[in-house]
Image (tube, rainbow, N blue to C red):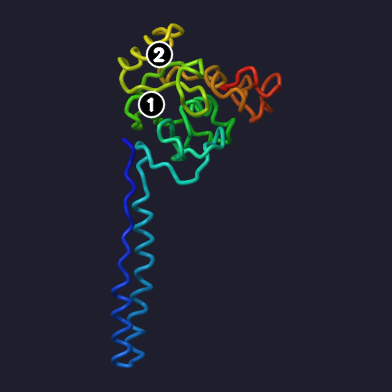
């Protein structure tokens, strides 16, 4: 389900060479003058084509931008394609994460990470089995609590599966988990966010929070709820 990046065509080389040859043979300044406006007119069109190719519908996952940091942990999101996640708000603002755990922290209270007031519209996570982006609303997450159980980024994350049977098979491999540890996106809350990224944010009673524990009730930075 990862979107493909479309190549950008560039088609001005032959026109430029042709104009130069014609000018050299005829020695006429007028021919250069006629060609130059044509080149100038092509530039806005190329820019518009590039903008159009980069547009992604709000209800579809987008390619992860090169070099863009995860809004929760500041790691480069695109560098972790086996784990990354993204969401889009109803106002169209799209947010990228290195992992489902960072998404869980943000999803509980976007305002804690300077997110917009607009509601979250759609969420995508990476399926543990296939490595493909899937609609988080249809996913089944295993609430992994031991960092030794999955060798993933940021140590601990709610592990996403497209199919519930895969989540159940995963759970059966560990004595620590049972069917109650298989959850859906609707069950994501502040407690889950603190479980995975409590060292980065602690939410206050209103659901807001501050990075490094500034917004927490006890102001201790949330170390007791850390995800490491």
Rendered residue at 38%/11% (across/down): 173
Q: Residues within 10 Å of mark 2 (few under 14, many from 20)?
A: many
Q: Secondary structure at mark 1?
A: helix
Give the label on residue 118, or none: none
Q: Residue 45's image quarter?
A: bottom left
Can you give x and y, in whole percent of width and height, for residue 195 in the image? 55, 18
Q: Quadrant of the N terminus?
A: top left
Judge whether 206 appears above or below 27 on screen: above
Left of 36 or right of it: where is 71? right
Q: Nearer the viewer, mark 2 or mark 1?
A: 2
Q: Residues within 10 Å of mark 1 (few under 14, many from 20)?
A: many
N-terminal label among 2 and 1: 1
Q: Secondary structure at mark 2?
A: strand
Residues tagged 2 and 1 counted as in contact (Cβ below 8 A): no
Comparing 48 with 168, the one in front is 168
Can you give x and y, in whole percent of width and height, for residue 142 in the image? 42, 16
Given the current orientation, which residue lies at the most extreme right position? 219
Give the label on residue 136, or none: 1
Q: Quadrant of the C terminus?
A: top right
Number of numbered discs: 2
Can you give x and y, in whole percent of width and height, for residue 210 in the image? 64, 29
Distance in Å between CA atoms under marks 2 and 1: 13 Å
Rendered residue at 60%/22% (across/down): 198
Q: Residue 208's image quarter?
A: top right
Judge whether 37 appears above or below 121 on screen: below
Comparing 155 with 21, the one in front is 155
Rendered residue at 49%/45% (across/down): 67
Task: Return the residue at label 2.
Answer: 182
Can you give x and y, in whole percent of width and height, for residue 95 in the image? 48, 37
Q: Residue 185's image quarter?
A: top left
């Amino acid at each position: 389900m990862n979107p493909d990046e479309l190549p950008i065509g560039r088609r001005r080389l032959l026109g430029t060479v042709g104009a130069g040859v014609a000018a050299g043979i005829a020695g006429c300044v007028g021919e250069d003058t006629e060609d130059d406006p044509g080149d100038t007119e092509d530039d806005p069109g190329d820019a518009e084509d590039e903008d159009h190719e980069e547009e992604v519908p709000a209800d579809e996952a987008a390619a992860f931008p090169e070099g863009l940091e995860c809004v929760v942990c500041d790691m480069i999101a695109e560098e972790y394609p086996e784990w990354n996640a993204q969401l889009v708000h109803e106002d169209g603002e799209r947010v990228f994460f290195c992992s489902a755990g960072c998404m869980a922290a943000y999803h509980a209270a976007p305002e804690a990470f300077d997110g917009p007031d607009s509601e979250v519209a759609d969420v995508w996570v990476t399926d543990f089995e296939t490595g493909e982006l899937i609609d988080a609303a249809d996913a089944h997450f295993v609430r992994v609590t031991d960092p030794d159980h999955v060798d993933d980024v940021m140590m601990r994350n709610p592990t996403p599966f497209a199919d519930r049977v895969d989540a159940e098979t995963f759970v059966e491999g560990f004595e620590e988990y049972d069917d109650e540890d298989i959850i859906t996106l609707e069950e994501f809350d502040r407690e889950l966010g603190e479980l995975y990224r409590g060292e980065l944010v602690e939410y206050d009673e209103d659901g807001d929070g501050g990075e490094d524990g500034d917004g927490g009730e006890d102001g201790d930075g949330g170390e007791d709820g850390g995800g490491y």
